[in-house]
Image (cartoon, grey):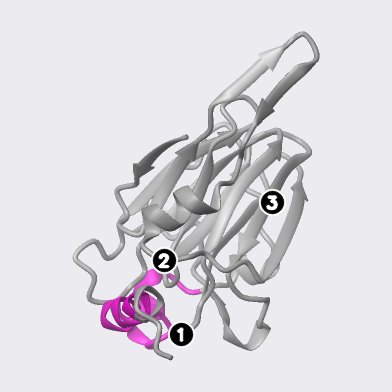
């Protein structure tokens, strides 16, 4: 499995080796040892989610309060999506930085997104099916969003695909507005939480 850190520190893309034969193919899409070695601590999986989206659907930019927030390992089972990671950590040297990876059922990559980062994707095909391994369960009172069409983010959504947003995502604040209202995690909070995962007490 090949591993590459994205331009947003704390996010990595994992590309598995595929073994095709006349029956089909085999691959390891998740390896706890490789993920743990990459992120510097074990990735505790508390919940697994799956979404199926029609072409153009945008989900995100979503994030959760730190601590504990929610780390995600995102994999596209069928179809294709443009997966997006945003550094929303106030005070981060790369605050506002965006990086994107195409996840699909050809290269079968996955992306790991650390706690405190923003995450979104757009379905590039009908029936795009995405599975998320999550470090914590869904906690609606701790969940937040940034408007994925925020011009300051300059996310390179495909020009030939009309974005389909939920009312909640369409009405979400811009990154600047969320930061001004102290709705985003701070870089210091995130660093402290990452350190607690690497060196748990007890």
Instruction: Give residue 153's position: percent from left, percent from top.
Output: 37, 56
First in sequence: mark 1 or mark 3? 1
Residue 156 visible in this rendered orientation of the protein: no
Residue at coordinates 61% horizontally, 75% vertically from top-left? 136
First to last magenta residue range: 173-195
Residue beneath label 3, please?
Answer: 131
Q: CA–CA distance between discs 1 and 3? A: 23 Å
Q: Can residue 109 be seen at all in this image of the molecule? A: yes
Residue corresponding to mark 2:
41
Question: How far apart are labels 1 and 2 at the CA level?
Answer: 16 Å
The residue nearer to you, when weighing 86 against 34, is 34
The correct choice, above or below, for 123 with respect to 186 in the image is above
Determine the residue located farthest toward the left in the rendered image: 93
Q: Do the residues labelled 2 and 3 touch (CB within 8 Å)?
A: no
Q: Main secondary structure of the magenta part?
A: helix
Dot in front, 2 or 3: 2
Question: Mark 1 — residue?
Answer: 67
Quadrant where the image shows the C terminus: bottom left
Tag 1: Cα neighbours inside 10 Å, few (<14), some, or many (≥20)?
some
Q: Does the magenta stretch include residue 179?
A: yes
Label 2, label 3: how far apart the Cα atoms are = 22 Å
On the image, the x and y values in percent for residue 149 come to 49, 56
């Amino acid at each position: 499995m090949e591993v590459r850190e994205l331009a947003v520190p704390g996010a990595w893309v994992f590309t598995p080796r595929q073994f095709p034969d006349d029956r089909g193919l085999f691959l390891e899409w998740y390896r706890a040892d490789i993920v743990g070695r990459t992120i510097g601590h074990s990735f505790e999986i508390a919940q697994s989610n799956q979404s199926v989206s029609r072409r153009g659907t945008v989900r995100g930019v979503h994030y959760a309060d730190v601590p504990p927030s929610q780390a995600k390992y995102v994999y596209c089972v069928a179809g294709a999506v443009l997966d997006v990671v945003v550094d929303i950590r106030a005070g981060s040297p790369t605050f506002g930085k965006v990086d994107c990876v195409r996840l699909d059922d050809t290269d079968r990559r996955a992306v790991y997104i650390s706690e405190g980062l923003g995450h979104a994707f757009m379905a590039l095909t009908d029936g795009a099916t995405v599975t998320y391994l999550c470090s914590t369960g869904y906690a609606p009172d701790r969940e937040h969003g940034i408007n994925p069409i925020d011009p300051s983010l300059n996310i390179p959504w495909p020009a030939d695909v009309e974005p389909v947003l939920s009312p909640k995502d369409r009405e979400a604040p811009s990154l600047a507005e969320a930061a001004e209202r102290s709705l985003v995690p701070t870089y210091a909070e995130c660093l402290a939480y990452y350190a607690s995962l690497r060196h748990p007490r007890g």
